Amino acid sequence: MFLTGSPLHVYDDTPEVRRQLAFMRAVFASGTPSFGSCAGLQIAVTAAGGRVHKMPERMEAGIARRIVATEAGRDHPLLADRPATWDAPAIHGDEVAELPEGATLLATNPVTRVQAVELRYDRGIFWGVQYHPELALGEIAVAIRRQADDLVAAGLADTTHDVEERADRVEALHRDPSARSLRWMLGVDGEFADEDRRRRELTNFLGALSDLDRRPRD
C-alpha cells in the first residue's frame, strides 16, 4: 500500500482526516506492508500513536537539503545505495513532532528532524519519508507555483516572481536532467536530478516486499 501527499492536515479533527487514520490503522491491522511520503508518513505516524504539528515559522519547499541517515538508517534497506548525504524533492509545512513507540528514525536533516522512518505497529510494517521520491520535478515545479504566496510569507522568497523563477529552473531540469548549468544554479546533483536515483526509496521498498511479506505476524 502506498500513501503519498495530501492537502489535509492530520492534526485537524475532520471527517476526511478521521477516515484516513481509520484506513491506515486497518492497513496496519491487516499486516500489509506499506510505504508513505510526506502526508502519508504523517498519517501513518499519527495512526500508530505519534504526533504531527505545523512547522513553526518555516517550510521545506522545493528541495530538502543535506539529508543524512541516522546510525539505524545507514544499514536499513529503505536507504540502500544512498550516499552519505543527499537532497530530495519536498514541499511541506507540517512535520512529525513525536514518533510513536515501535518507530525507528532512519534519516534527518537540519530543517526537519524526521525525514525517514520505519514503523512497526499492530501486525504491520511501514516505511516512510517526509520528502517526495514519487514526484517528477515538473510536479514539484507546479507545487512551488501553487504555494507561491505561502513561500513568500515564510520568508523563503522575497516576491512571487522569485518563486516563479525557481519553479522555471526546476521545470527546466525536469526536461533536461543532465543540464550542468541547471544543476549548478539549483545546487543539486544526480540524487535529485536523475529519476532513477531520486526514486531510490520506492525501488528499495518494492525490492524488499517479498521479505516484508514473510515477516512473522502475531
Image (cartoon, rainbow, N blue to C red):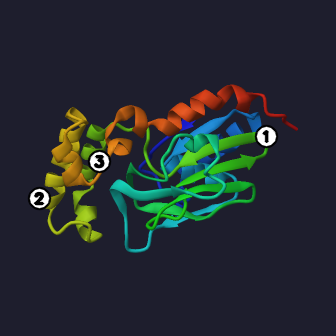
Q: Earlier in the sequence, mark 1 or mark 3?
A: 1
Q: Residue at x 66, y 29 (%)?
A: 209
User: Badge 2 local density, few (<14 within 10 Å), some, or many (20+)?
Assistant: few
- Badge 1 element: loop
Q: Earlier in the sequence, mark 2 or mark 1?
A: 1
- Name the residue type under label 3: Ala
Q: What residue is disc 1 on? A: 123
Q: Residue at x 56, y 34 (%)?
A: 204
Q: What residue is disc 2 on? A: 161
Among the 4 quarters of the image, the one containing residue 151? bottom left
Query: Which residue is farthest top?
Result: 210
Query: Which residue is farthest bottom?
Result: 57
Q: Earlier in the sequence, mark 2 or mark 3?
A: 3
Of 207 and 218, nearer the camera is 207
Q: Is residue 203 above or below residue 50?
A: above
Q: What residue is disc 3 on? A: 143
**Do the numbered discs 1 and 3 sit on residues whose CB atoms are within 8 Å?**
no
User: Badge 1 local density, few (<14 within 10 Å), some, or many (20+)?
Assistant: some
Spatial CA distance of label 2 from label 3 is 15 Å
Residue 15 visible, this angle: no
- Name the residue type under label 1: Arg
- Badge 2 element: helix
User: Badge 3 local density, few (<14 within 10 Å), some, or many (20+)?
Assistant: some
